[in-house]
Every structure is written in structure tokens, then in C-alpha cells.
């Protein structure tokens, strides 16, 4: 059963999928419609899941489920990855490749715009001053809506990258 994201409880479990590029307005509209349709039918062992899907910064697909209502199972989580794969297949083209599962890119936020850097070049970008301690980054490993709301966007100096300073 679909619930608007802002109405999901703080304890709701979240998964964040970072796109390898920004989505166009058309892609976002389609992704939200497909996500809401998926969410309205999403179930675990025949039990409906209170869930939500939202897009953030044109680059992040966020899926949430209220496990106090019904717990997501391995199969239902696999089904949510199927949603992600469906979006990749729909919008991945040679001219504009799209992946939501590439973990080699780290996202940063500057002036409300996301930019990606390969993880292997982070030390160099920090040394050059292109990434500073106060540069904002995304903690895509948050696991609850409360963490998402409070700890998803953080300064680099409070992230796992702090060891490079």
C-alpha cells in the first residue's frame, strides 16, 4: 500500500539507490509513477507492505517500508531491486547510460546540485582542495527514515572520508 514518503514513520526502513546521472523530468515522472504503482502492490508473503518511493535531487531513488505494519522479506526486497532494474532498462541508452547499482561513484552536493566522483580519485580531489571538509556528501547507508531525514546529507568531515583530512 502506497503511503506518501513524508507520512512514513521515523522507524521505516529505507534503501537508497544512487543513479549514475541525473534523471530528466520525463524520467522522473515515469519513475515516480512506476514506483507508486509498485508500492501500491508490494507485498511480503501475501501481506501488503506500507511503503513509499521518492526521488531526491534528480539522482536518488529512495524506497521506504513501515515494517511495524508487515516486515519485508528477502523475496519482497528482491522485488524492489526488480523495480530498480526496470528503471535502468527503461532509461539506459548508449548516449545516456544509467545505473542505480554502481557503488564506485561517491555523490556530493554543492549549491543544491549533485556531482559524482570516482571513489578511487577521492584522495586526489581532497588534496587538490576540490573536496573540502565542509563539502556535503550523501550517506546512502542510512537504514531508517529518521536517519535519512537527519543523517543522509552530511559534511565530508563527518563521513567515512574524514580519514583523508
Image: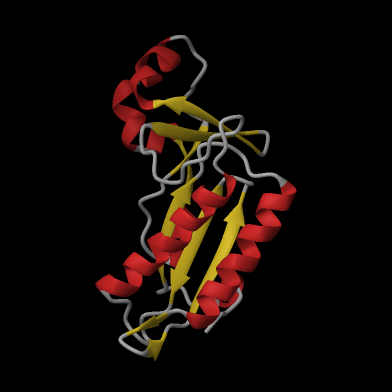
Q: How many marks?
A: 0
The scheme the figure's colours follow is secondary structure
Q: Position of residue 1 (x, y in %)?
A: 52, 84
Q: Furthest residue to the top?
A: 128
Q: Is residue 11 left or right of residue 153?
A: left
Q: Is residue 70 visible?
A: yes
Position of 57 relative to 142 (above/below): above
Judge by depth and name the residue closer to the eye, 58 or 89.
89
Q: Position of residue 107 (x, y in %)?
A: 49, 35
Position of 47 relative to 109 (above/below): below
Judge by depth and name the residue closer to the eye, 137 or 29.
29
Q: Furthest residue to the left?
A: 74
> Residue at point 30% right, 86% down?
45
Position of 52 relative to 147 (above/below): below
Q: Quadrant of residue 127?
A: top left
Judge by depth and name the residue closer to the eye, 143 or 94.
94
Q: Quadrant of residue 29?
A: bottom right
Q: Is residue 24 left or right of residue 1?
A: right
> Residue at point 50% right, 59% down?
62
> Residue at point 70% right, 44% down?
24
Q: Position of residue 8 (x, y in %)?
A: 52, 76
Q: Is residue 69 visible?
A: no
Q: Quadrant of the C terminus?
A: top left
Q: Quadrant of residue 124?
A: top left
> Residue at point 60% right, 33% down?
96
Q: Position of residue 9 (x, y in %)?
A: 48, 77
Amino acid at each position: 500500500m502506497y503511503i506518501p514518503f513524508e507520512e512514513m514513520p521515523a522507524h521505516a526502513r529505507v534503501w537508497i539507490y544512487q543513479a549514475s546521472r541525473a534523471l530528466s523530468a520525463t524520467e522522473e515522472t515515469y519513475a515516480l509513477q512506476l514506483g507508486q504503482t509498485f508500492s501500491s502492490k508490494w507485498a511480503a508473503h501475501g501481506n501488503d507492505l506500507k511503503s513509499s518511493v521518492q526521488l531526491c535531487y534528480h539522482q536518488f531513488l529512495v524506497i521506504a517500508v513501515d515494517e511495524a505494519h508487515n516486515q519485508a522479506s528477502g523475496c519482497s526486497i528482491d522485488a524492489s531491486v526488480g523495480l530498480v532494474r526496470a528503471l535502468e532498462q527503461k532509461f539506459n541508452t548508449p548516449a545516456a547510460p544509467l545505473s542505480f547499482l554502481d557503488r564506485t561513484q561517491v555523490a556530493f552536493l554543492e549549491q543544491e546540485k549533485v556531482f559524482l566522483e570516482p571513489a578511487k580519485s577521492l584522495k586526489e580531489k581532497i588534496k587538490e582542495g576540490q573536496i573540502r571538509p565542509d563539502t556535503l556528501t550523501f550517506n546512502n547507508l542510512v537504514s531508517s527514515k529518521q536517519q535519512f531525514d537527519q543523517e543522509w546529507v552530511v559534511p565530508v568531515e563527518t563521513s567515512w572520508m574524514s580519514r583523508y583530512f
